[in-house]
Image (tube, rainbow, N blue to C red):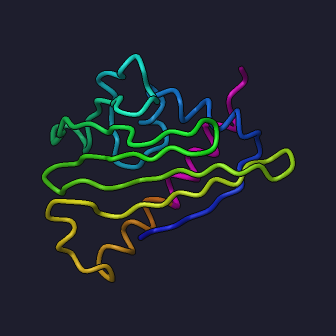
Amino acid sequence: MSVHRRTVHASVDRVWSVLADGWLYPLFVVGASRMRDVDPSWPAPGSALHHSVGSWPLLIDDSTSVVESDPPTRIRLRARAWPAGEADVTFHLQPRGVDTEVVIEEDAASGPAVLVPRPLRAPLLDWRNSETLRRLAYVVEGRTD
């Protein structure tokens, strides 16, 4: 499992507001290139984001669904990215004074990706999640609402 932490200079509620706005995911999730639709009940359990992954012209339409949601401190997702498979992704938000420590955990859950030995898939997941948290921090800290 890939686990990364980053301090975001904003409140837990402010970070959650970005995670709770499904239309913003392509701004910070590495690999998500566009959002096609967001279920009206997002981020309630069972709701989904309908996104595309890859780069044009090689785009794959897929989805990410909410497995568990405990606003404003935790959301657990099942991210689909076929033909690679599916991944379990959890964001944990913990207040640290006026800041928030964001922890992201991710690992392959099904499909061909689970056949790749951990030592081979870990570096890519580690890089991806480090960059995702960097981008999330930029989005949260740059919002003016």
Does residue 14 sit above or below 126 in this rendering?
above
Does residue 132 sit above or below 112 in this rendering?
above
Residue farthest along the top direction in this orientation:
40
Quarter-of-image position of residue 110: bottom left
| Image position, residue 98 (x, y; %) | 85, 44
Quarter of the picture holding the N terminus:
bottom left
Of 132 and 43, nearer the camera is 43
Quarter of the picture holding the C terminus:
top right
Residue farthest along the right direction in this orientation:
97
Residue 141 part of the magenta-drawn span: yes
Most common secondary structure along the magenta stretch: helix
The residue sitting at 43% across, 25% down in the picture is 42
The answer to whether residue 112 is left or right of residue 22 is left
The answer to whether residue 68 is left or right of residue 144 is left
The answer to whether residue 121 is left or right of residue 93 is left
Residue farthest along the bottom direction in this orientation:
119
The residue sitting at 49% across, 42% down in the picture is 28
The residue sitting at 68% across, 28% down in the picture is 143
Does residue 102 sit above or below 2 in this rendering?
above
Of 16 and 68, nearer the camera is 68
| Image position, residue 26 (x, y; %) | 41, 36
- Magenta segment, which residues? 130-145
Label count reads: 0
Residue 56 part of the magenta-drawn span: no
| Image position, residue 132 (x, y; %) | 50, 52
| Image position, residue 85 (x, y; %) | 19, 55
The residue sitting at 45% across, 47% down in the picture is 76
Of 122 and 97, nearer the camera is 97
